[in-house]
Amino acid sequence: MSGAENVQDSVGAHNSSQDQVTLSQPPIDRSMAIASLGPINPLPTDKSSDPEEQQIELSYINEIDSKQDEIATEIVPVNDPKLKKVRQRLWTTVLSAIVACIPFLLVGCTLGFPSGALLDLTDLEERLEYKLTREQADLFGALGYIGAVFGGPIAGWISDRMGRKPALMLVSIPYLIGYLMITYARFASDPVVFKTILLIGRFFSGVGLGWSSLAVVVYVAEISPAKFRGRIGSVLQIFLGFGVVLIYALSSIDDFRYFDQSLILVGFVALFTILMPFFCETPRWLLAHGQKDRAIAVLKFLRGPKFDSSSELNMIKVNIASTPKLKTKQTLKEFTKGNVMVPMGLAILLAVFLQAGGLNAIVAFSALILQAAGVPSFRQIALYGTGCTRLILNIIAVFLVDLVGRKFLLFISSIGTFLGTTMLGVHFYVTDPSFCSSMNSTNSSQSEAMEVCNSHLAPLAITAIVVYNIGFSIGWGPVIWLLLGELLPLQVRGIGNGIAVFVMWGVAAIVVGTYASYAEAVQPWFVWWTYSVVNFVSLLFVVLCLFETKGKSLEDIQTRFDKKYGQFKLCFS
């Protein structure tokens, strides 16, 4: 039985007490009540010549008017001093968020899985014909992100039509298929069959990665109160960071191979599948689909049975009342409107900058990069330099994201990622064979000169990766998922986030799939300085294009876009 269902029996009592409170108050003026609930999304003032569009707008106006009448008669007064003394309960929201974030632990594991697995799969000395080539290794890394490209839109469609909770629960299917295939591929008697099963398994685990990136973000954003959404939402990045640490730690254990690691991940999928049915649907989705009693019960479960959540309930109602239920064609037309197009553009650019700055090249190939840089004990350094650094900073970011704000953290973060990639480029430049040979004052061979360069400059590579991970984890890591859940309006949030996730993992697939061949074609130092340019541009984007969302409700953020861009449409819309 779910948490929401556990409190269903209290709904009647809640409604009864609500009626008593309402009777004890003075009569409510309809216009004042609606005004107190917040602004309604403005309709465009230009008159369309398209009869179909005029009919849609007319039905939209009638729908809003009828819903405003309904809301005005259902207002729950919020000035009862007895209710105001009760503080909202947080532990149920936090517990729900923690369970919902288990797939994000698997996101971290899936991102970091190639780092150790490829060391095994490219070094199968006992079965040489099963060994992955460089191109196959690149494909193995990229397939996780290619799968994620498909997972995001699937999750968005299910999230809007079946609910946030079903979309979250169904993520277990691709994860389970993917990691079971990777686990048991080793029993294949033919090298071609082995590699095929392995690559298909990696693809399905990637579908789970993209699916989680949307379903978890939307679910956590919609169950969290505005005041604490930043801190609760940062749990996402903590779980992701812990997932990276976990997979790096497992890969650093002697004789613990890639198939042992994947079997551990199957266990986490099973744990999530058992726990998630006991938790609730989001109140926003329930109200949007006419399930008012269940929405009230969920709010009582999340905020506490004695806390007055009527203000939050009323704000959600007004937001839904001003948001028409759109068919596919109408939804696509929404993306031509300024108040949807602008936040959609911001979400897409955030997704591009997150991935194009070298993030997943470091996460997926951390051990291989350190090995190429001549760093001894590269598996352990990858664990501590990438995994542990990110996890510690993710925990710190939980307390900063609502304290100093999203924009400031992204600003500091962009500086850190720029410095980290620049330093790593410097390391590869000065350890380039031609540069080392030119700086060689002795008559030693090129290989001896390279060994001297690597031994002296290995700390620079370690420092660069640590600086990058500090910068990323303090801002881009936790903030990106919050902003994706905050920026887009309700009527396109599921599909819009699906598009952003599609772009995010599409860019990641390009970065990871081309890293080795790109580095071979133009030298590694040029690759990392390319990422530096991207990180510098992301710094300008943060300063010039983003506004602060700290402490604002989802409805307040949407109203800002409505006021500034609500009258703007593309010329062909």
Image (cartoon, rainbow, N blue to C red):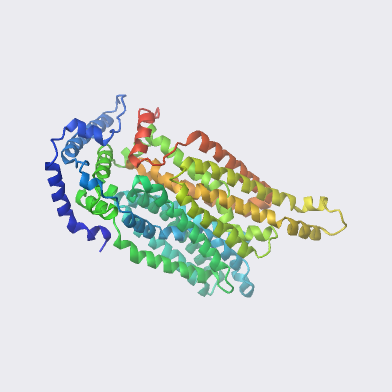
The percent position of residue 248, horizontal first and vertical second, equals 55, 64
> Looking at the image, can residue 6 be seen?
yes
Q: Quadrant of residue 132?
A: bottom right
The percent position of residue 565, horizontal first and vertical second, equals 38, 30
How many marks the image carries: the answer is 0
Q: Residue at image x 45%, y 45%? A: 403
Q: Quadrant of residue 58?
A: top left
The percent position of residue 412, horizontal first and vertical second, equals 55, 43
On the picture, is 514 further left or further right than 550? right
* 496 vs 333, nearest the viewer: 496
* 283 vs 138, nearest the viewer: 283
On the picture, is 423 further left or further right than 498? right
For the view shown, which residue lies furthest in the right direction? 443
The percent position of residue 99, horizontal first and vertical second, equals 37, 60
Query: Would you place residue 543 above or below residue 166 in this image?
Result: above
Image quadrant containing the C terminus:
top left
On the picture, is 217 further left or further right than 475? left
Q: Residue at image x 58%, y 47%? A: 417
Query: Would you place residue 24 above or below residue 249 in this image?
Result: above
On the picture, is 300 further left or further right than 217? left
* 520 vs 470, nearest the viewer: 470
> Looking at the image, can residue 289 be seen?
no
Image quadrant containing the N terminus:
bottom left
